[in-house]
Amino acid sequence: MAMRAFYNEIKGLKVRDLPGHLKPRFSWTNIKKSADEAVDRYIEKYIETSSVEPLFHVCIGGMIFSYLVALPEERRHLEHQQHAASGGGHH
């Protein structure tokens, strides 16, 4: 929905006018304001309604974070296994 509104804003602009239109949207003030509004909406939707969903969000976010942190080590381990299986020897 937000993407459609954004597209409708810029579809009539010329390419040379686009940077001037986008620059104010990426200012620190606008980014902070947007983040504050998003947090306020989240609080209204989930926290003030005593929903259990924030607990799910924390759990899922923690799982994704731990996966991303462990990913480089897992890739090294897999690469080592593939090297050993191809007869690369053991070190």
Image (cartoon, helix red, strand yellow):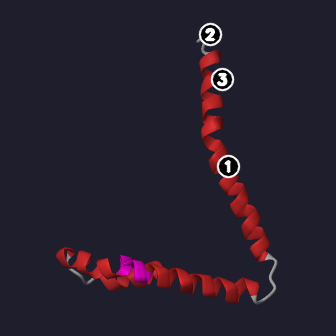
Q: Which mark is residue 89?
A: 2
Task: Please give the name of the residue rendered at 77% of the width and 75% of the height, measured from the top-left corner.
Answer: 53
Give whichever of 23, 85 is nearer the camera.
23
Left or right: where 45 falls relative to 33: right
Task: Please give the name of the residue rendered at 48% of the width and 80% of the height, measured from the top-left corner.
Answer: 32
Q: Quadrant of the C terminus?
A: top right
Q: CA distance from mark 3 to mark 1?
A: 20 Å
Residue 1 in view (yes/no) = no
Q: CA distance from mark 1 to mark 2?
A: 29 Å
Residue 61 in view (yes/no) = yes
Tally of numbered tags:
3
Amino acid, disc 3 = Gln
- In this view, which residue lies farthest toward the left? 16
Say above or below: 69 vs 54: above
| Label 3 crowd (10 A; few <14 / some 14-19 / many >=20) | few
| Label 2 crowd (10 A; few <14 / some 14-19 / many >=20) | few
Task: Please give the name of the residue rendered at 20% of the width and 74% of the height, measured from the top-left corner.
Answer: 15
Task: Please give the name of the residue rendered at 68% of the width and 85% of the height, measured from the top-left corner.
Answer: 43
* Secondary element type, mark 3: helix
The verdict on residue 26 being magenta is: yes
Chain part drawn in magenta: 25-30
Report the mark closest to the observer, 3 or 1: 1
Amino acid, disc 2 = Gly
The verdict on residue 3 being magenta is: no
Percent coordinates x, y for residue 80 in the rendering: 62, 23
Percent coordinates x, y for residue 46 in the rendering: 73, 83
Q: CA distance from mark 2 to mark 3?
A: 11 Å
Q: Which tag, 1 or 2, sits closer to the chain's start?
A: 1
On the image, numbered disc 1 is attached to which residue? 67
Percent coordinates x, y for residue 44 in the rendering: 69, 89
Q: Which mark is residue 81?
A: 3
